[in-house]
Image (tube, coloured by chain):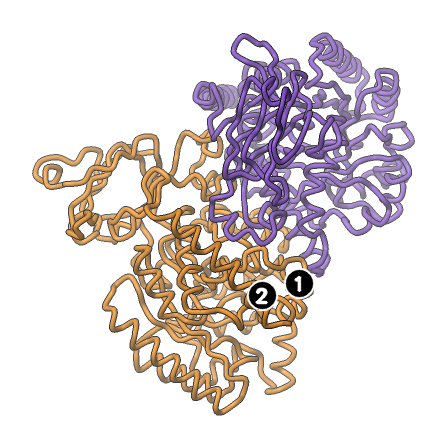
Chain colours: A purple, B orange
Amino acid sequence: MVDRMGREKACLITGTCIEGRPVEILIDETGTIAAIDEKISGSERSNAEVIIDGSGTLAMHTLANTHTHAAMSLLRGYADDMILQDWLGQKIWPLEACLTGEDVYWGTRLACIEMIRSGTTAFNDMYFFMEEAARAVDHAGIKAQLCYGFIDLNDHDKREHEIRATEALVTSIKGMQNPRIKPAVGPHAVYTVSPEGLAWLAAYSASEQIGIHVHLSETEQEVLDAQKNSGKRPPAILDQAGCLTDRTIAAHCCWLDQADCRLLAERGTTVSHNPASNMKLSVNRAMPYPWLVEAGVPVTLGTDGCASNNNLDLFEEMKIAALLQKFAQNNPTCLPAEEALSMATVTGTRALGFGSGLLVVGEPADIMLIDRMVPCNTPLHHQTSNMVYACNGGAVKTVLCNGRVVMQDGVIPGEEEVLNNASRAAADLVRRAADQAE
Amino acid sequence: MVDRMGREKACLITGTCIEGRPVEILIDETGTIAAIDEKISGSERSNAEVIIDGSGTLAMHTLANTHTHAAMSLLRGYADDMILQDWLGQKIWPLEACLTGEDVYWGTRLACIEMIRSGTTAFNDMYFFMEEAARAVDHAGIKAQLCYGFIDLNDHDKREHEIRATEALVTSIKGMQNPRIKPAVGPHAVYTVSPEGLAWLAAYSASEQIGIHVHLSETEQEVLDAQKNSGKRPPAILDQAGCLTDRTIAAHCCWLDQADCRLLAERGTTVSHNPASNMKLSVNRAMPYPWLVEAGVPVTLGTDGCASNNNLDLFEEMKIAALLQKFAQNNPTCLPAEEALSMATVTGTRALGFGSGLLVVGEPADIMLIDRMVPCNTPLHHQTSNMVYACNGGAVKTVLCNGRVVMQDGVIPGEEEVLNNASRAAADLVRRAADQAE
């Protein structure tokens, strides 16, 4: 907990419950969970300078969103229900061509508010003007792994530009020395990055010991084109360049075959499942969850950007993931609630390197307090079922990240300013794009 | 608007917007929209005894849920992620066998609160102890068409019992003389009701001029069994008995073929799409939306009961419907946002006979005020897109039904009592079922 003067303070959450057990949670000055007990007493209690009343709440570890483009919140609702190529070519790309760093700052602030409201305190982001995204995450008080979306389209000069942009972002983020913000490299996809580009990104990420964030096998076209152009499937192309590592998060992965799944497992690569985006854009196949589980690939959850979802609520994404897998596999036992929650907590948090994703002593105090007295938690036969199938992010009352309160009883300081600035930035962006089109 | 003494009063909503246009909405003493204008003035304004401040909101017609089993809210999260027959046989039916009228009252009250919170003021319900459900809807202040779930399993004595139960409910609801509550008949499905039962229900509903609410072609097994047992597909069985009418709402309809869709269109029957339930229970086929639209069948939205969804939020259902249809049809232009919203407003409200579903002068004042200053409405490029893809029911601030405020600024009078009683009823129900199983 940080007070108004920026001093770190020990903090005590009272009156809450963990899996039906009434508890108090003590958080030390470093933002680490120091004790969880029915009653914290003695000097531990008296040292806590901040008390958070958790009466009527269920305490859980917060959620991790392993694939998004946060600043695309500015494009929410700008274009929907279109054929992918029209949607990109006529709507999304012309608008993105007019984006400024300030837009990305306010779009990312808006995204952070949306994520905090729905219990997400860590995310994996790929976009442009990422120094501005880093500044936004810093101000929002949550955690992110940020990468610049590297696209060279097999062009040497473009590649040099993208290499410099990648290096600049990594240097900039390392210079912030903020343990909540990590750099990564972001090869956009095998169809937008040359083999040379992929190889450079792999070598650079290895030397810097940072993550790799990539789109993989999202559409059938991507797989067919890769096979036509190189005789290899997309995972093999990434692997040949050294991009499949245990620091890699591959998003979408709808069109993996069983051998692809085994390759990802061997490399220790994590997959980010993005069911809402995949359904909205009609990719025509659900990520093969049973094959990935069988192979031993860690599977996590992402919302994708707001242009193709159109929100960042991981509660909703857990439900859609469970529903889509059951439907696609024709098996109602596929992806049960416990697994959906693990994807969004334990597996996602670990993949981003922000702890174990468990609400236990010694871990970062990334905690959400969920309202117990709401219809979605009435009755409370099975807490995990309610989280996945009944509740949405609106049930989250209070959120802490590294022990710092980022939302208390539904209030996020400065929210109105962010909403106003994001609205203004989005309107200006559309105006600039229209001027440009004339 | 009704004041504390039960007197009807004229009411004025100020400061809101309809589709981007700043308006005031005047509601007369009968709960009808009397005027919508930038500024209501003169005697109309001065006659309004109640003023609702709609600043910072978007006004829309409320939503209609055309298939649910409201009291199953008590079973929320009791059993999930199971094979259908195990789920029913081991979990749902044993619990339902222990249900009491009081349980149904509190379960329906809980469901009404959940629906009000998410902007639904009219629903189509099928369950047991429906006199208690009617009492709950009366107290909640919203609208419903209620039917007793008629199941005779080809047994003469059971049929006589179900006929008496159906007649008793219709007589009881007609006796209430509450224009917000209508009776219907509820043939459960072609595999649970005999041809004689179906024929009686068709004749009775025609003589009483009331609706018919039925499950239809939910699973492939239902279609295969019907063909094996009678040589007919389920819609033809209903039609032969006279159950396909323009007063009929058929839920699910996943396994209709194109000829089935044309038959429904000829009879004027409405379909209720229940995408979340269909996906969760793995029915292995999405309702054929394009065929239904082509044939001219009115398609509406339902949540099904909380045991198979597990909430009653039609905002979520609009999104899941749009996503499922795009995914199942492999076409991102299928079921665009405008159509999803129409299903939940205009088509659903009309199917239940509660007005046009439009927010216009002369119609019942069934109005929701949506919060404008929330992340899901930031930016506001396209209001309908935000409603369908970005927001959930949590964006609803204030709800009126027939001009009466049932939620204001997120507050529903008496909510805590309902949540407590529903929690207690659910826990007692599980205890009774466990005692019985011993």
Q: Is residue B332 above or below residue B91?
A: above
Q: Give how far apart the Cα atoms at labels 2 and 1 are.
A: 8 Å
**Left or right: B143 with respect to B239?**
left
Element under label 2? loop
Other-residue count near label 2 (Cα within 10 Å), few / some / many at <14 / 14–19 / ≥20: many
Q: Amino acid at mark 2?
A: Cys
Q: x, y percentage for residue B270?
A: 43, 66
Examine the rendering and report whether any part of residue B168 can be seen: yes
For the residues beneath circles 2 and 1, the answer to whether they share a chain is yes
Q: Which residue is mark 1?
A: B284
Q: Chain of mark 2?
A: B
Q: Which residue is mark 2?
A: B254
Q: Nearer the viewer, residue A22 or B405?
A: A22
Q: Residue at x 54, y 35 (%)?
A: A15
Which of the two labelled residues, at mark 2 and mark 1, occupies the earlier sequence position? 2
Q: Nearer the viewer, residue A365 or B55?
A: A365
Report if the CB atoms under discs 2 and 1 are less than 8 Å apart. yes
